[in-house]
Image (spheres, coloured by chain):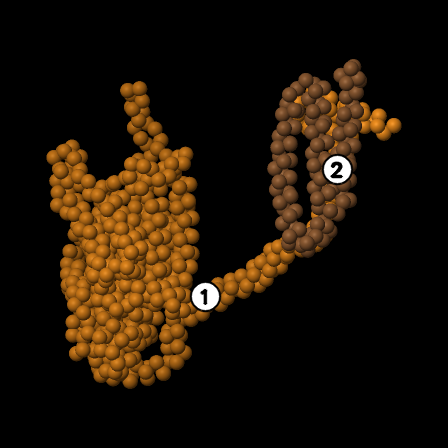
Chain colours: A orange, B brown
Amino acid sequence: MTESLHLWLIPILPFAGFLLNGVLGARLPKWLVSAIGLLAPLGSFVLVVNAASAALITAPKTCAECGSAAASVAMPYAETWSRPWINLGTLHVDFSFVIDQLSLVMLLVVTGVGFLIHIYSVGYMGDEEGYARFFSYLNLFLFFMTVLVLAGNVLLMFVGWEGVGLASYLLIGFYFSKTSAANAGKKAFIVNRIGDFGFLIGIFLLLASFGTLDFAQIAARFSASPFHIVIQNGAPSLSHGPALPSTAVITVICLCLLIGAAGKSAQLPLYVWLPDAMEGPTPVSALIHAATMVTAGVYLIARTHALFDHAPVALAIVAFVGAATALFAATIAVAQNDIKRVLAYSTISQLGYMFLACGVAAYAAGIFHLVTHAFFKALLFLAAGSIIHAMGGEQDMRKMGGLRNRLPVTFATMTIAVFTISGFPPLAAFYSKDAILYAAFVHGPAGKLLWFVGLVTALLTAFYMFRLWYMTFLGEPRSKPEHHHSTPLSMLVPMVILAALSVCGGWIGIERFSAFLAPSISAPRARAASTDVQLELVLTLLAVTVALLGWFLAHRLYSSKPERAAQLAAGYPAGYKLVANKFYIDEIYDAIFVKPLMAFSKYILGWVVDTAILGGIAWLLAGIASFTGAILQRWQSGNLRSYAAWLAAGAAAILIFVLLWGSPHGWSLTLLHPQTVYKVTHITTLHLGQAGH
Amino acid sequence: MTFLQHDVPFSWYLLLSAILFSLGVVGFLIKRNLITVFMSIELMLNAVNLSFVTFAREWDMVKGQIFVFFVMMVAAAEAAVGLAIIIAVFRARATLSVDRIDLMKL
């Protein structure tokens, strides 16, 4: 009795928007382009909300026996296209879309925040060239992102995974006439390729060891008892289920998936593309490189948590990668001056938190932080975009300052976002960050270290966010921009909504949130059953204290005595330079990977293989051809009688050949009747022979 | 009139055909005048026609004779086209010597 939720429409609507705006957009009036670009994500969002209400409102009533009574949708709810996608021997892959609690949360974030950012883009991109192109790319991104989230199997997810990478590439390089933007797009794509390679290997290994790519079937293999009762000839008998792969195999699979997740979610050591991705328009940074796409790695780990739960080593590596990334990126963010780069490193750092949460098997906390992060980080980017818009394209915070009077709404929303990300109660990130820190703390001995790293990161986060806040909004204006753009309403409304979400987003609380997610993220692992209230209170107080400390430090350095920061930096020139230059990671990668590869390409592949070997072969062939041609062209005298002579000589040669060697039953003149041939050749030879005498 | 019916041996016809054909080939190769070259081709065609007819009669098959009609038809068409080309060449070059008609020479 389940009603159809038309899940396939959720991705198809943005895809239609992409096609319409991509093909016709340049010829359509602007209002129509905006309408198409906005209606597509709105339609998807409405469908997702419809699915959510169908699944949530009546779900509790459903039970296995009274299925008919519940006219609702039980989760996980799957829709599969009737035609299989791949059907090869034992491999079956379908176009199947699945909604469960996890994908529902993701979908709400993706389409909801996505729609808000679409609205923002109408104002932000209003006077840009390629307006229709921008919206078609944004819709394309939403199409692939919803496919990624809805996918019921790893392969379909990989399609979405690659697709969002493509959309990301297109949007980073949106201003493709700018060299830095084009290069940033390429960098993002290539670094993601490395991660995707790991992901792909993981998919192959999954297929080899599990024989299926379906998430539900893989998870079922873990939950199923190794013995099945099989009814055979009316009598029940015990039978072995398929054996689980060994822990080592699962660990390898998980590590491969982790490489993929680290590439997409900009974790160590594959994070380098995300800061450069800020070359894209700011709404893109908000949507793709903060709120949705970069969280796909977290989603992947949560989606395949059944595997990770059985690979403790891989899980520990996830945790440490996340913690290291969180701290590392936060350190870099402290010394950046480009407002979007600060936010980019902040994103990397927050994604590290999510990985840390997944690594201590607190998937619910990770997803919780993913949701709140989507709100406040999208808001931060949108507010930054509003600032950049007002400053006429200026992104250097050193040239900002005193903007609170000029941009009151932006100031208000940005302030909310800054307080949120710093983790002050009762704002959203306070709840999610606390959940992560608590989960880390209670996670065995290594958990204490992870918790401490998380705490230090929280301090740094508060510091660099308030630094940004002071540098942009407070103090005196440090430059007079020539253009004074006012912020249109289409930009302000999404910011206000996101600000409201940043405030309220966490009020659901981790207990209720993890209880909601429990069916799709194995229940016992979702949250430690016994919650030590006292411990939690202490940890919370510590986190808030640390956030206050960060604020205080930023205040001392950047507000009351602005020159102190410079003095401090001058006091530790080596350390400051190291951080300001992002630990020279780009340069190190350049020296270790890029330069040798370029040299290898240029000298070995380019000179030796291409020019010498392949080119040599080509030149050799060409030389042979022209040499023989030079000889043979002497035949082409242009003289009619010489042609005739060659013709006659050729005919004579054939005749002689046939007469001497042509066998009557062989190949020679089989066009004629064999008997006839015999007679002809025979008689002719005879008489020619006689004539010769 | 037995002579006419039987006495000319089969091979003589073929020999005559071969001689005519060889004359055609030689004329085709050594003559410089385009018209003569053209006539040599006709000679070769007719030599072939003769052997066709000869074989047709010898083996009581009508195919060979039908073939001769085809050859004659094609030869007639070829003569028309060929002569037209020769006239065009003469108008353009004012010569009919094949050695001078060598525009295709490299």
- A2 lies above or below B51: below
Three-letter residue code for mark 1: Tyr
Marked residue chain, label 1 = A
* Residue A161 point in image, percent of width and height: 34, 52
Q: Residue at x 66, y 24 (%)?
A: B64
Horizontal arrangement in the rendering, residue B105 relative to residue A40 (left or right): right
Can residue A387 be seen here? The reply is yes
Is disc 1 placed on a helix, strand or loop? helix
Q: Nearer the viewer, residue A387 or A473?
A: A387
- A550 lies above or below A523: below
Callouts 2 and 1 in the same chain: no
Q: Nearer the viewer, residue B54 or A241?
A: B54
Q: Quadrant of residue A274?
A: bottom left
Q: Quadrant of the N terminus of chain A?
A: top left
Q: Nearer the viewer, residue A564 or A395?
A: A395
Three-letter residue code for mark 2: Gly
Q: Residue at x 36, y 64 (%)?
A: A173
Cβ atoms under marks 2 and 1 closer than 8 Å: no
Q: Residue at x 31, y 22 (%)?
A: A232
Q: For mark 2, what is the residue?
A: B24
* Residue A387 point in image, percent of width and height: 24, 73
- Numbered badge on residue A589: 1
Q: Residue at x 58, y 58 (%)?
A: A610
